[in-house]
Amino acid sequence: MRRLVVILAIAVIAIAGVWSFNQAIEEARQKARERSGLGTGGRPENVEAIFGGADALKIVTGPERVIAERIAPPESEKPGERKLADYRATSKPITVPNDMSQQLGAALASPDSYRWKTTKGCIPRYGVRLSFSKGADRIDVYICFSCNILLVAQNGVTKGGEDFDDARPVFVRAAKKLFPDDMVIQQLPEQGCTGDD
């Protein structure tokens, strides 16, 4: 009987040790993610703030129509003076298929798509505009593949922006399908940043 109690005690201690070890590994992984800027601050209200509120985000996740266009920045010697209204379309508007609209909306609405506690020193050159429409409202998402930054405007008014490094593969794959004849888009890697739109 005494031997059975000793064996059970050793088994309980071993199980507790394995559990404790696994917890320590998970905590170390989480701390590493936080230090790298991945997965930090990622709450739904953070995403809503990028879009100007929950109602605006609902337009992105449940649009009636989504249009994609290639765009180019205005010819300005001072990039800080570029206005979104000055970006010009360089392609015809393309209607985004429903399944792709859902994928894009899900990526844009996910807190895990963004790098929350990071700052980049680049000046975005937006090369793609996604326009999500519902009724009279329109949400424009301006995408810069050069530095993985997006900017959001609702009905022409800038609402917010964020680094989208973790969702880049979703946006690159969509852009390649939407703009099959655009060599700049076709050469975009799914990971990292590029010097092009």
Image (cartoon, grey):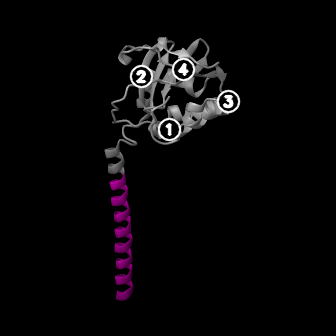
Query: Mark 4 vs mark 1: which is more N-terminal?
Result: 4
Query: Mark 3 vs mark 1: which is more N-terminal?
Result: 3
On residue 71, which mark appears? Answer: 4
Q: Secondary structure at mark 2?
A: strand
Query: Mark 2 vs mark 1: which is more N-terminal?
Result: 2
Q: In this rendering, would 145 be left or right of 115? A: right
Q: CA distance from mark 3 to mark 2?
A: 25 Å
Decide: is 131 above or below 176: above
Q: Which residue is mark 1?
A: 167
Q: Secondary structure at mark 3?
A: helix
Decide: few, some or many residues near mark 1? Use Cα within 10 Å; few <14, some 14-19, many ≥20.
many
Tell me the magenta residue range.
1-29
Q: Position of residue 127 (x, y in %)?
A: 51, 25
Q: Position of residue 183 (x, y in %)?
A: 59, 32
Q: CA distance from mark 4 to mark 1?
A: 20 Å
Q: Nearer the viewer, residue 187 or 136?
A: 187
Q: Which residue is mark 2?
A: 160
Q: Nearer the viewer, mark 4 or mark 3?
A: 4
Q: In this rendering, would 105 be left or right of 75? A: right
Residue under the image location 56 percent in, 14 percent down = 137
Residue under the image location 43 percent in, 13 percent down = 83
Q: Which residue is mark 3?
A: 98
Q: CA distance from mark 3 to mark 1?
A: 19 Å
Can the viewer see residue 64? no
Decide: few, some or many residues near mark 2? Use Cα within 10 Å; few <14, some 14-19, many ≥20.
some
Q: Secondary structure at mark 1?
A: helix
- Tell me the chief SS of the magenta region: helix
